[in-house]
Image (cartoon, grey):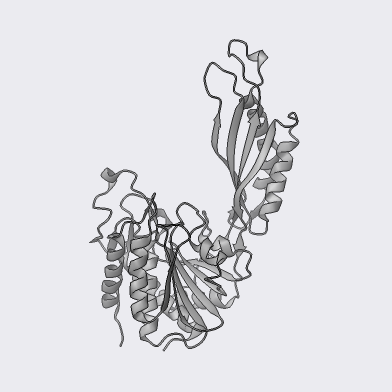
Amino acid sequence: MTIDDADLADRLTGILSDLITIPSAYPPGDSTKICAYAAERLRAAGYRTEVLARTAGVDNVVAGLGQGAPALVFNAHVDTVGIDDAARWDSDPFQADIRDGRVHGLGAGNCKGSMATQIWLAEEIARRGGPSSGSLVFTFVGDEERLGPDGLSYLRETGKVKPDMLVLGAQTSNQLITEERGVIWARIDTTGRSAHAGNPAAGDSAVLRMVRVINRIEAELAPRLAARVAGDKRATMNIGLIRGGHNTNAVPSSCTIEIDCRLLPETKVEDAFAELKDIVMTAGEPAGSVEVTFLTGTNGFTAPADGPAVTALSQAIAARQGAPARFLNAVGVSDGRYFADDGIEIINFGPGSGDEGHAANESVPISDLVDAARIQLDFVGRLLGVG
């Protein structure tokens, strides 16, 4: 049975409308109801389906069809950001508002639009008899918006998904992101000695010590990062948090900053942290007055331009859109980072523009949904074969 674009648009907007009506915002990030919806549909379509959770309230779906290699895994995160100011929305964020060729609603773009196309894709491939070779797996996960460990990271850690190729739903306007920078978060603590503000010389200001440490970082690390450029990708640093002291009339005895560094894909997290720590610990402050702590981090990745998944998806995009696929630069990071060291192909792809995510009146073009569904069906056919 051939499905025309109008019928496909109706099916996709129907699925997306269902998803928008199921709250899954973080906080609290409860994904039980939306994962139950996805699991029920895929189980009914004939997939081997599990709902898995390490932490109560953070459910994840794994649904597979076929056997053996290659293993092609699709992923979309089910959680959204919360509503910052409901007054800024022109419609109910939890009801799909379909107008002007777009679907409006919380998560319409990030990432329920991708989730809707993947649910349709899973059902359509099952209807056609499944993949001719290899295995096809769909994963729908929570805990992405807080960069947490209980979503796709948990599925990798427990061995529930072992992809050879991983396609993550993202707002790429149906183009490709095949590279992501690595990221580290680090905390720096300085300590001093408290005293009355009327006699600051009797104390030792941890805030002033931190100022010297920051100046050292700006003088030494910032220029090194600025010189690390590869195409559109740049290494960056941001001091995103600072806190210190306890009262205006007291010399502060402690101060803390937290730093976010984005790394080129070829830079390893351990090397980047060692570099930061060396710069800080050689700033000339007394022994024991400065501490550098690694908080979290993951390496970047680059999918080979001639890999089978990149090649097949590029061909499917070109066939649908009548123009060569474009490769976009990622500003943020995706859950693909958990597989960065696994030697697999990792691609971000999906409907909608990144400008729409995390914004009031979030929306996705219906034409993007249709194109994404068509492209991904063609892509799976090129890789695994579909009846």
Name above or below for residue 126 compared with residue 102.
Answer: below
Name, please, the residue furthest toward the top. Answer: 198
How many discs appear? 0
Residue 368 appears in the picture as rendered: no
Residue 294 shows in this picture = yes
On the rendered structure, is 78 left or right of 313? Answer: left
Compare residues 245 and 2 and report the one nearer the observer: 245
Q: Measuring from the top left, give residue 354's x and y in whole percent.
A: 43, 57
Horizontal placement of 76 versus 93: left or right? right
Which residue is at 44% across, 86% downward? 386
Horizontal side of 32 relative to 229 (left or right) equals left
Image coords of residue 266 (percent x, y): 67, 59
Q: Position of residue 317 (x, y in %)?
A: 45, 74
Nearer-the-camera pick, 12 or 364: 12
> Where on the picture, by quarter, is residue 170?
bottom left
| Residue at screen point 54% across, 76% down | 309
